[in-house]
Amino acid sequence: MNVLDKKQNNEPFMLLELGINENGYEFASDIKTALSTAEGELDVVSAKLEESLDSLKKLTPECDRTDYILSACSGALCGIIDVFLEGKPGESPIGEITDKWFAKRTEDFARLCGWTGDKGNLSSAIRHLEKKFKIPYDQNGIGGIAKELLDLTPTNHHFKSLGHNPTILGFFFSILDQFTNTSHFVSEGELIAFSKFDGDFYLEGKDIPSKLFCGFANWFGHLISDISGSLSGKGRGMGIPSPFWGWSNDIIAIKRKLNLPVGEFDKSINELALDIYKQGYDARFQTTQAIPVFVNELLVRFIYSIRRLVKYFSMTKKDDRSFSVLWKSCEPFSNATIKRMLTVAHGTFCAIDAGDAIAKGFVSGGGSFNVTEFVLRLNIVGIGRFTFSLYGEANTGLKRHALKEDIIILKREKLILAEYADGLNILAEIYDDESLLLFTKELKESDMYVHAFEKTVLLAKKEMFQRMIY
């Protein structure tokens, strides 16, 4: 029924819309139909509200004080490990373990490729891999004008040679150099290319796809041969550049290829990356930095699971326990609580690591700030992980804000519909729809009422005509 709530002299009244069709008079609707429609809309809004509240609950961290304290303790513990057991290249007890692990993996890979040398003979394994995966850009010292342009030495040739960079662009230049028998280097902000350094080099393959596969195999195999240091290196040896700092070469190479100017900032970053590389900051040390970050990650997730596991068994009766509910309560993935705990843990770790790096930078600088020392001790992996956590927190916060606004609107709609339904229920008790419909039937069948309506219509027309005259 089309019901209009109006007030006349501060008294509410109801206006029922009466229609006329071919069969006679009828009400547009009845109160029961309107009530049914309102209740249906109320059910839809209630379901949406419940779904939004459930989504908001999933996006809201439920960390208590103990969760925050334990997360901060985990970050602090791993930060102490980072300060005292990782340090910087050449002074890292964990780094020594990582170097040995990479050396063993290099030997294992060489053995898969046909090497039959003695265990522990790393130089023999490297020599076998270099012969097996020959590339045209493996120069560690060049004489003449090329030496003046590149200043290429055994301590920097892995960094300056783009093909030795474990990045996407490094792979691209490796394939390019193998197809064209060239060598590309980045030095002092310049991209320098030399052709046919190795006249004996030949890329295997009968067609383009097979040559691409052989080129990839050569690039990957040669990186494995150099990851533990080249044969010409002394001591720990110069491994391949870290993927993070290798991008400083890629930026310069891209800008030079696009004829864009290379700024002083780009050159400074590239020089800094080369400087720390020569002091041992390579892919092996980058992996070493990931160890305390990984331990921190595992420790926080373990703490979360153990606390929820104890809570589940202490609050759930034996007959009500099930593995699915247990896993849902304890799984340390994809929920706002564990994400908040990880943010706290990694933030604490980064605060301790950065504080140590800044302090060592000032101490080694002798009154000034030593940027190289600072970067050598700064855990880039930890900062990257913490940045990822901050991004996740910001994204979740925006989603929570949007859901809260939707919930406010849905609550208002639910309240309005509930009041409307209550009003219709009251109307249903006051008005008898059946009697009203019988009234229309009597109205249609009564000649007296029909003549009365016709007279009212005639009077209305006369009144309208009179108003038009005057």
Image (cartoon, rainbow, N blue to C red):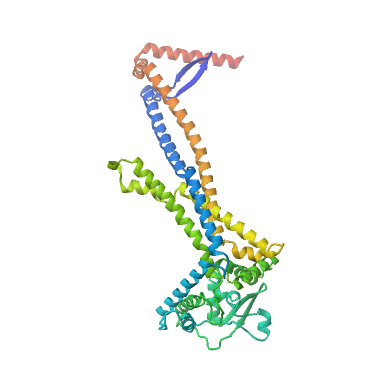
Identify whether 187 is placed above or below 432. Answer: below
| Residue 83 in sight here | yes
Q: Position of residue 412 (x, y in %)?
A: 49, 31
Residue at 49% over, 16% down: 12
Residue lying at the far right in this picture: please name it.
367
Identify whether 11 is placed above or below 352. Answer: above
Identify whether 208 is placed above or below 31. Answer: below
Q: How many marks?
A: 0
Compare residues 251 and 296 and report the one nearer the observer.
296
Residue lying at the far bottom in this picture: please name it.
200
Tell me if 406 is positioned left or right of 248 in this view. left
Compare residues 122 and 363 and report the one nearer the observer.
363
Tell me if 251 is positioned left or right of 70 in this view. right
Identify whether 139 is placed above or below 339. Answer: below
Task: Using the rendered view, name the quadrant where residue 267 is placed.
Answer: bottom right
Residue at 43% over, 38% down: 48
Residue lying at the far left in this picture: please name it.
319
**Dividing the image into 4 quarters, which one contains the C terminus?**
top right
Residue at 40% over, 14% down: 450
Q: Position of residue 1 (x, y in %)?
A: 41, 24
Q: Position of residue 174 (x, y in %)?
A: 54, 76
| Residue 30 in sight here | no
Q: Position of residue 293 (x, y in %)?
A: 50, 59
